[in-house]
Amino acid sequence: MISRILLLTSALVILHPCLAQSLVEPIEAVLKVGPEAAHHREAAAAVTTLSQAPASELPRLLGAMNQANDLAANYLRSAVESVLDRSFASQKTLPLGEIRDFLLETRNAPRARRLAYEILQRVIPEDAARMLPGFANDPSAELRYDAVELQIRSAETFKSGGQSAEAVRTFQSALNSARNPKQIDQIASELRSLGVEVDLPTHFGFLTHWQVIGPFDNTRLEGFERVEPPEKEIDLAAEYDGKSGKVRWTAVNTGQEHGKVDLNPVLGESKEVTAYATTVFQSPIDGPAEIRLGCKNGWKVWWNGKFLFGRDEYHRGARIDQYRLPIQLQKGANVLLLKVCQNADVKDWTREWEFQLRVCDSSGTAILATDRPPTPKAAPRSPGKSRSKKD
Amino acid sequence: MKVFSPILPILVLSIASLSAADWLQFRGPNASSLSPETGLPRQLDASHLAWKVSLPGRGVSSPLIVGDRIYLTASSGPEQDRLHLICLRASDGSTVWERQFWATGRTMTHPKICVATCTPCSDGKHLFAAFSSNDVVCVDLEGQLVWMRGLTRDYPNASNSLGMASSPILAGDTLVFPVENDSESFTVGLNVQDGSNRWKIERPKVSNWSSPVVVTPERGQPLVALMSVSGISFVEPATGRERVVFGEGGSTVSSVTAVEGMLFVPSKGTTALRLVSDQEPPAVLWQSPQLIHSTVSPVVLKDRVYALNNAGILKCSAAKDGSRLWQLRTTGPYSATPVGAGDFLYLLNEKGLLQAVDPTAPEGAVASTLDLQDTFIATPSIGAKGLYLRSDKFLYCIKAR
């Protein structure tokens, strides 16, 4: 049935003015959806109206997602799917030309573009498949992911066919495009098996050089909220009262594959403690960016002296990009401060006291500091003797 | 085993009291895990697999059954941030409709579960689906969106890096959804009309995957039982106001089973409570430290209570006093709670071995098995003349030939 749906070129789509106007108010109602169910009832009525729109209005509904918050985008998506269901059931034509144009305009909302792609994939799968390789560097994370998958499959074919040079070239191209951590790890593993060195901390943009200080007290988890001196001033020459005596800032760097900074060997493995880590990020640009943090301890983050977010969850797991914190980069020096808290639990899987942090854009592309030092070969480097995990 | 009350209520525990064959929430009618459905196969063999369909994403949530349709959730995508609502025909598993949403909250979970772990619920007209990202979606049964909430969007520290798993329930016109975790921990009562907060109460800052149940005291109005590590808080559905408390501990994984004024609590093995009114704390009837439930919830069939531990030992005790009757070795490990229809229980282990258990046999007996050779974490559902089993990738329908 789907194959019988005709491609209607954008040149043929002429909206009736009254029809187009009739969607203005419901779209505006949906765009007002906000926190704690704000404007939900109006939005529900609006979605019912939008769901009855003709298929010719699909580009408009997709376009409305450019102005939508993440909740409103879901309301619009629901309307798009209802329109599609009716269109497929009644074999109505879809404005595929306009949908394709919407997809190819990379300034449109990434998720809306992915939805446009999936519409094309459903109706004209061969055309969609032909377009996919072109999305390897796309702002849409999912389009990019699928395009990189194609590159990985292609490189694997070269490798299994004994074409090592082509395999390396294709894997390297895939690595340049990849933003998904699992894909990146897979590609890095393949490249290393072919004798190619890969600097993953730099690819991700993990910050590898830090100053750390601690331990401070976190008995009964009260240290999470307690303001210690580094929250008031960052003076790398200063000395403070810690949990078990005087504490000073110590330089630490990491060459760990995923930028993990392990505080245990640096500050001594102990429980019910907090520590601070700071670094200066020399930004090449002004503009919006993200801090992406992975941490299974309690943590707080400040950027240029402003508190961003904190979380008092302990030992429920960590991963790359676990938390995404929007920031505003200023060209030149930006000061980052991180607080990392350890709880009282003594189970073996609660010993980690560590974090991994990178700076990137919203697509996950690393933003590298202008003074980024070479990635250390050995990690982590500790000035003192590491305590055994069995201690 | 310790018996606390000399006067025990007369138990008339019969599935005949269940009003409909629809399976509208986690563990079905009254969260009992029991269905009034008849005619399910007892001597299982491969011919009872009526159909098997692939699903568009992962899921640990159970299917709902409303009339001749099945509703379930799934999650997909590299970041597991695609949330699916799917409607299938019970007759052949074909898709009636599907809706997708983008998660607004964090999607990290333990690999054993996924973002689609909470089982949805329904009032027979609408579907209320919750996800580990703390997104809650209401659609009508034709898939038309009514509202969507992003509770982590609204309350940014409400999440669990291992994943959220509590299933929402309907209590009157309030949707009760626990968002209990180590950080910003609460339970909300949402207005089913528009998803707005009727109430939001602070809860213990402890990760909690157990699901609430509606309990009706012998005297008074229905209450919602919210269990956490310290015990059970019984709250009014309309206001969230706490009415009575059971403070002797509870599970943060398994859930309470309520049967006609009695509660079987996965606490200290099993603790049986009697909720006389909405004014006084529940009375402890008995406790049995041996009746351990691991991750599954208690099942009460006829006058017996069953506990299934992770090693596969199914223990049967008298519901009235907890006295031990028998125990049966079955094949585990289990994540899914057993479900029952007629006199039989159906146990589904994580490796896909479905076991039909005849609990009327003198020491219980595994009457038959069917090996589906797949990974199952979700609790099965019963209705529309079939047993519906949801694996990580497929939905299976088991029914009589």
Image (cartoon, rainbow, N blue to C red):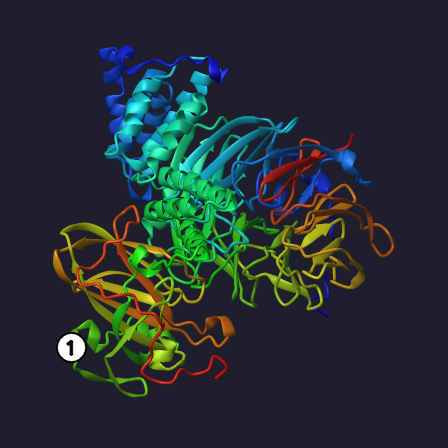
Between residue A254 and residue B362, name the one nearer to us: A254
Protein chain holding label 1: A
Residue B18 location in percent, x, y?
A: 67, 39
Q: Can residue B375 be seen in this view?
A: yes
Q: Position of residue B225 (x, y in %)?
A: 53, 54
Assign a secondary structure to mark 1: loop
Q: Is residue B124 left or right of residue A135?
A: right
Instruction: Determine whether A253 is above or below B300 in the image.
Output: below
Query: In the image, residue B382 lies at what x, y percent?
Result: 67, 38
Q: Quadrant of the N terminus of chain B?
A: bottom right
Image quarter for residue A79? Answer: top left
> Which residue is found at the position 37% from the left and 18% from the top?
A52
Name the residue beneath numbered marker 1.
Answer: A235
Placement of A181 over or under A158, stated as above or below: below
* Quarter of image, res B145: top left
**Kind of residue at disc 1:** Asp
Q: Residue A391 location in percent, x, y?
A: 48, 84
Depicted B229 relative to depicted B67: above or below: below
Q: Which of A243 and A134 is in front in this view?
A: A134
Q: Residues within 10 Å of mark 1 (few under 14, many from 20)?
A: few
Q: Can residue A40 be seen in this view?
A: no
Q: Residue at x 36, y 48 (%)?
A: A172
Q: Is residue A173 left or right of residue B28?
A: left
